[in-house]
Image (tube, rainbow, N blue to C red):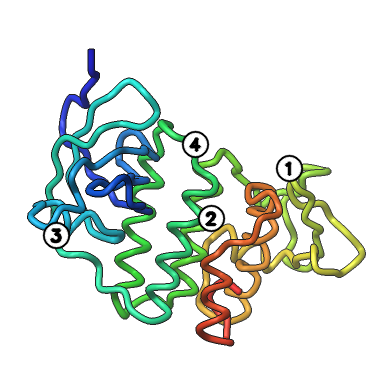
Amino acid sequence: MMISTASWQRAFVLHRRPYSESSLTLDVLTEGEGRVQMLAKGARRHRSSLKGYLQPFTPLLLRWSGKSALKTLSHAEPVAAAFPLTGSMLYSGLYINELLLRVLEDGTNYSALFFAYLDCLQALAGADTPPEAALRQFELSLLTSLGYGVDFLHCAGSGQAVSAMMTYRYCAEQGFIVSLLSDHYSFTGRELHSLAARNFTDEHALRTAKRFTRMALKPYLRGKPLKSRELFRYVNKSTRQYG
């Protein structure tokens, strides 16, 4: 017997691939069940109503069924037009999609992350938030959703409050420990306070956040480079967003 979702769920397509002559397989981020893989039967047919909007960055309402890991899409409706991402904003969107594909387990509820993803797309499509800040905000939200809640305000060794005048070294799976050395893994207390507040109002704060999130996300990527980074490097030699 097929198992169906009880109601419609808000969702975004992260990635799509051709399947047979007329169908698609989809990797989808849903509000209630996190990442879900599903088969969209007939979605590639010329007259299919699904053909135009089962695309990344389009807000959708979906229903599906099935017992196996690969669900069957039963109904889909667009909620709104796709977010208008172009140029570097498009590559930023591809980056966060690939990041989610690489680190999320299927069928785990990431409802808070779903809304962080939505906020990031809105920021990338608008003009109020610099793309670098939107990406760093999303990466920190992703780490929190993965259960990697870093304490930026207390020394992991002593438990004492981080001092703005001291230097701290990042240790994976532990946190920040006071250090007399200054290297790539070191952060000033002032920088850690900015990270805790997610205050990315200047270039230095953005560079600091990028340096930290790349360190923290590295274990989840298992040494495999992200294709979206390589694509961005190929198209544009400047890699300010996530190079």
C-alpha gap between disc 3 and disc 4: 27 Å
Residue 149 is situated, as x and y percent measured from the top left of the image, at 59, 43
Residue holding disc 1: 173
Residue holding disc 2: 140
Residue holding disc 3: 80
Q: Is residue 10 above or below residue 206?
A: above
Query: Mark 2 vs mark 3: which is more N-terminal?
Result: 3
C-alpha gap between disc 1 and disc 2: 15 Å
C-alpha gap between disc 1 and disc 3: 40 Å
Q: Amino acid at mark 3?
A: Ala
Query: Mark 4 vs mark 1: which is more N-terminal?
Result: 4
Screen quadrant of the N terminus: top left
Q: Is residue 200 above or below residue 8?
A: below
Screen quadrant of the C terminus: bottom right
* Front position in the image: 59 or 227: 227
Camera-near label (4 vs 1) is 4
Q: Is residue 36 above or below residue 175?
A: above
Q: Report the residue that reaches farthest toward the top.
A: 1
Q: Amino acid at mark 4?
A: Glu
Query: Mark 1 vs mark 3: which is more N-terminal?
Result: 3
* Residue 118 sits in quarter: bottom left
Task: Classify mark 1: residues with Cα within 10 Å, few (<14), some (14-19) or many (20+).
Answer: few
Query: Mark 1 vs mark 2: which is more N-terminal?
Result: 2
C-alpha gap between disc 4 and disc 2: 18 Å
The structure residue drawn at horizontal position 55% and vertical position 64%, both measured from the top left corner, is 227
C-alpha gap between disc 4 and disc 1: 20 Å
* Front position in the image: 75 or 43: 43
